[in-house]
Image: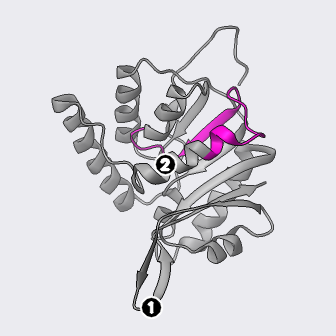
Amino acid sequence: MTRKDNEVELNIINRFSIINSEFFFSWENAYRQEFTNFEDNGETGEVWFGQTCQQNIIEWIKICKEIKHTDAIVDLGTGNGFFLITLAEQGFSCLTGLDYSENAITFAKAVAKNKNINHITFEKYQVCHDKGTFDAISLMPGEFEHFKNAYIAAVKQILVDSGIFIITSCNWTEKQLLEHFKGDFHLKEVIPSPSFQFGGLSGSKYTTLVLIK
């Protein structure tokens, strides 16, 4: 899509059509309730993986020399739009949110409008961020391989060559994620996450990887 001079468009849109109806409607109902709560009392909803996770990713983006404030950034499974809204407040201007829930889109638009934030539309993106969409797809028994391949193809299609893909998962370890994306992406960096210890073993609450197409 070619942008005309000074043309700015709010672009939190529905692009995911691979989700089965039962799974889809569970999220529709959840975001319908969150939107109602926002209208009633201004609550902006849950931040996936917590604000610490999101803030660590945003801080990494801010100091990454390869990412400019004018680069096009897309958030997969944008939910309430918290990630994009925070980036906009930090001066990033070319932001797009995608979600398979229409109610999530409505909710995110309302939150963004309340903060007077708009997003520019692009076809290709320098940065793609996912904070749970891949995890959600992996919860579909018997269909994961099909949906995983469709997901990877979609991410590759919207990213420029050598584009940055940031993914956070609580279902998969670093090693498992690299196995899923091998041949399509390579590891640039691991963003640290909170760790815990139990029974003499240590682990992380979630994993955040920075991959390069």
Q: What residue type is labelled 1?
A: Gly
66 drawn magenta? yes
Residue at position x 38%, y 48% in the image: 47
Q: Where is residue 19 in the image (x, y as percent from the top left)?
A: 47, 57
Helix, strand or loop at mark 2 = helix
Residue at position x 59%, y 31% in the image: 95
Q: Position of residue 49 (x, y in %)?
A: 42, 57
Residue at position x 46%, y 47% in the image: 100
Please give left or right for residue 8 compared with residue 28 in the image: right
Against 93, residue 150 (above or below) is below
| Residue with the most extreme top position | 5
Residue at position x 26%, y 42% in the image: 34
Residue bearing the label numbered 2: 54
Q: What residue type is labelled 2?
A: Gln
Q: Which numbered disc covers residue 200?
A: 1
Q: How crowded is mark 1: few (under 14 residues within 10 Å), some or many (20 or more)?
A: few
Against 142, residue 191 (above or below) is above
Please give left or right for residue 129 compared with residue 79 in the image: right
- Mark 2 → mark 1, Cα distance in angstroms: 28 Å
Please give left or right for residue 72 compared with residue 29 in the image: right
Q: Give the range drawn in magenta.
A: 60-81
